Image: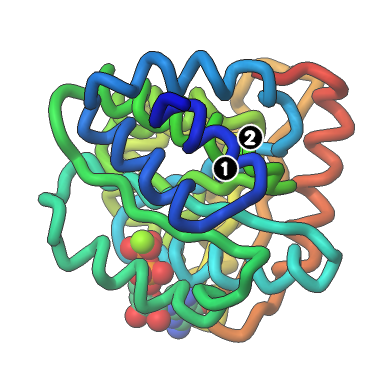
Amino acid sequence: MSLAETLALGIAARERRAIARAISVIENETAEAPALSAALAGRRGHARILGVTGPPGAGKSTLVNALIGALLARGRSVAVAAVDPSSPVSGGALLGDRIRMIEHQDDERVFIRSLAARGHLGGLTRTTRAVVDVFDAARFDEVILETVGTGQSEVEIAGVAETRLVVCPPDLGDAVQTIKAGVYEIADIFAVNKSDLPLAARAAEQLRAMLAMRRPADWTPPVLRTVATTGEGVAELLADIERHRAWRGGARR
Ligand SMILES: Nc1nc2c(ncn2[C@@H]2O[C@H](COP(=O)(O)OP(=O)(O)O)[C@@H](O)[C@H]2O)c(=O)[nH]1
Ligand SMILES: [Mg+2]
């Protein structure tokens, strides 16, 4: 049996070592990568894919951790890929992510992996897609992609997701310019996190005002307030994620 076939079998059995090895094959673009992709192609379409993006420090990883807990409580398995195009492989941000999500690291229904930032953006987007396929083939119910970056990288990687959550800090500050510049056009849902801090209410109002100036559409992104550290607002967030999925219907990647 080829390595790709062996890995595909291991992935289907949700063996952690096979999943980890497959992701390394994809990241390093080794010779087995195309055969692996081909072997997994028939197992696509199970996972629901959530993209979580927003500026560094907004609380994305903490919120993802809270979401993992809420999803597990609902009987779902969850795989997470944290993508940071701006950080080197061993960068502090990625290490920090692991620490913040470590609560669920040992649960066999959870798989968390940081993706290294190598090569150009198109390559990273392709890698992200292939990693989603691995998680999908392992029959994780939920795949969460946490991305940070500026402008194009967020938009492109978020494009892999079905539902895009943009996490904002309570002090929008410079983020307003980014929002107006169109980066946050990708949002299906906004979460103003750190809503235990002052300014969060105003940030939510600002976002709603900006959204009101958009052309009317079938889907108006809800603006939620969350406190990732306590889990406040997470149940409501999950309800809106489900609502967005229902609105999108069967349309997948
Ligand atoms: N006060 C407060 N702090 C938070 C909240 N969520 C996250 N933080 C803190 O904000 C910092 C950055 O969080 P992190 O999840 O790493 O942000 P990321 O860079 O967007 O992934 C950490 O120190 C968190 O503990 C929140 O809801 N309230
Ligand atoms: Mg993070």
Quarter of image, ligand 2: bottom left
Residue 94 place in picture, x, y as percent: 26, 61
Tell me, for residue 148, which label it has, or none: none
> Image point 84% across, 64% down: which residue?
75
Are discs 1 and 2 less than 8 Å apart at CB? yes
Q: In which quadrant of the rendered view does residue 218 lie?
A: top right
Which element type, helix, strand or loop, lies under badge 1?
helix
In terms of depth relative to the viewer, which is nearer, 46 or 35?
35
Single out the mark in the foreground, 1 or 2. 1
> Image point 70% across, 43% down: which residue?
139
- Report the amino acid beneath label 2: Ala
> Image point 30% across, 42% down: which residue?
24
Q: Measure the C-alpha gap from mark 1 to mark 2.
A: 7 Å
**Which class describes the residues within 10 Å of circle 2: few (<14), some (14-19), or many (20+)?**
many
Q: In which quadrant of the rendered view does residue 42 lie?
A: top right
Q: Is residue 185 visible?
A: no
Count how many numbered circles sit on residues in the image: 2
Q: Earlier in the sequence, mark 1 or mark 2?
A: 1
Residue 196 place in picture, x, y as percent: 55, 82
As drawn, is 70 to the left or to the right of 15? Answer: right
Image: 151 above or below 115: above
Looking at the image, what colour scheme do you see? Answer: rainbow
Quadrant (top left/top right/bottom left/bottom right) for the C terminus:
top right
**Which class describes the residues within 10 Å of circle 1: few (<14), some (14-19), or many (20+)?**
many
Residue with the mark numbered 1 = 11
> Please, which residue is most extreme toward the front here?
1
Residue 90 place in picture, x, y as percent: 13, 60
Residue 147 place in picture, x, y as percent: 38, 45
Residue with the mark numbered 2 = 137
Q: Is residue 60 visible?
A: yes
Q: Is mark 2 within 8 Å of ligand 2?
A: no
